[in-house]
Amino acid sequence: MSAPNRDPGEREAPGHASAAYAVGDVARIAHISVRTLHHYDELGLLRPSGRSEAGYRLYDSADLERLQEVLFYKELGFRLDEIRELMASAAHDRGAVLREQRDRLAARALRLEAMLAVIDKTLASLEGRMQMSDEELFEVFGDFDPSEHEDEARARWGGTAAYRESARRTRGYTKDDWARFKRESDAVVNDLAALMDLAVAPDDARAVATAERHRLQIDRWFYPCSHEMHVELGRMYVADPRFAANYDAARPGMTQYLCDAIAANAARGEG
């Protein structure tokens, strides 16, 4: 194998065993086309670390990590030339990049989740199935303005099963239904606060049971919510300051407490 061919500033990732992947293997692992990998090579965005004796591209584990960063940046809307410039920087730090990418994706997911709920309620109001004031439509989201992102939500989520299922269910909800949902949600928050006051650990059976109630509320009211999805939601709550502010207003640290209880519940439910 020839010597690695990397951009300036790129460091070998620690803790990885040496591995060599052919271009077809990388395409299969990353769910992209061989043609895309060739294009990335031509752009200098992702060059293989070596070549076989026959001249075929060979990628190592560090190359796959770099490819992951590229694909995350693409998901966030960056152009390929922008990605190349960012990743060629001498100050490039993979850990810092991934943390920033995660925060951006988590914030986007939460915004879209909120937008879906607002759109569903607005449709119900327009169709005469419920009466809600403007304040009621927006109060749950604080300073969030869904009108700025409705087109994005429809474009990105309109064809998903979760979007269709949420729309199907909420289409028939009345104002009383939404009030009942809020009472159920408040009950979970109050119970979490009581457990925290008693210094109950988040992996205690009582906290785990409360986290399961939280999951089942989502599952019952909006869309099927698996344990895995619930864990991701918990992480998003922690990452998004608006959600953290809402939960932590009841008890400081409740967002993280709920996230930990969700993780403990998932571990038991999938164990």
Image (cartoon, helix red, strand yellow):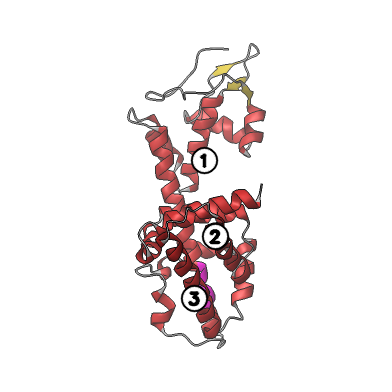
Q: Is residue 65 above or below residue 262?
A: above
Residue 126 visible in the shown view:
no
Look at the picture and state if 250 lies above or below 179.
Answer: above
Earlier-in-chain disc, 2 versus 1: 1
Q: Tell me the distance, in whole angstroms, between the alpha carbons under discs 3 and 2.
A: 21 Å
Per the rendered image, the range of residues in magenta is 116-122
How many residues crowd mark 1 within 10 Å: few (<14), some (14–19), many (20+)?
A: some
Q: Is residue 5 above or below residue 204?
A: above
Q: Which residue is mark 3?
A: 182
Asked if residue 120 lies in the magenta stretch, the reply is yes
Q: At which x and y percent is residue 136?
A: 42, 80
Mark closest to the chain's N terminus, 3 or 1: 1
Residue shown at 63%/19% (left/top)? 56
Residue depth check, mark 3 versus mark 2: number of the one nearer the observer: 2
Q: Secondary structure at mark 1?
A: helix
Q: For mark 2, what is the residue?
A: 206
Between disc 2 and disc 1, the foreground one is: 2
Which quadrant of the figure has residue 238? bottom left
The crowding category of the residue bearing disc 3, from other C-alpha atoms within 10 Å (few below 14, some 14 to 19, many at least 20), is few
Q: Which SS class for mark 2? A: helix
Which dot, 3 or 1, sits closer to the camera?
Answer: 3
In the picture, residue 242 is in which quadrant?
bottom left
Tell me if I can see residue 56 in this picture.
yes
Residue that numbered label 1 is attached to: 71
The image shows residue 210 at horizontal and vertical percentages of: 54, 63
User: CA separation, marks 2 and 1?
Assistant: 40 Å
Residue 260 lies in magenta, yes or no? no
Who is closer to the viewer here, 106 or 252? Answer: 252
- Tell me: 92 left or right of 168: left
Tell which of 139 and 52 is nearer to you.
Answer: 139
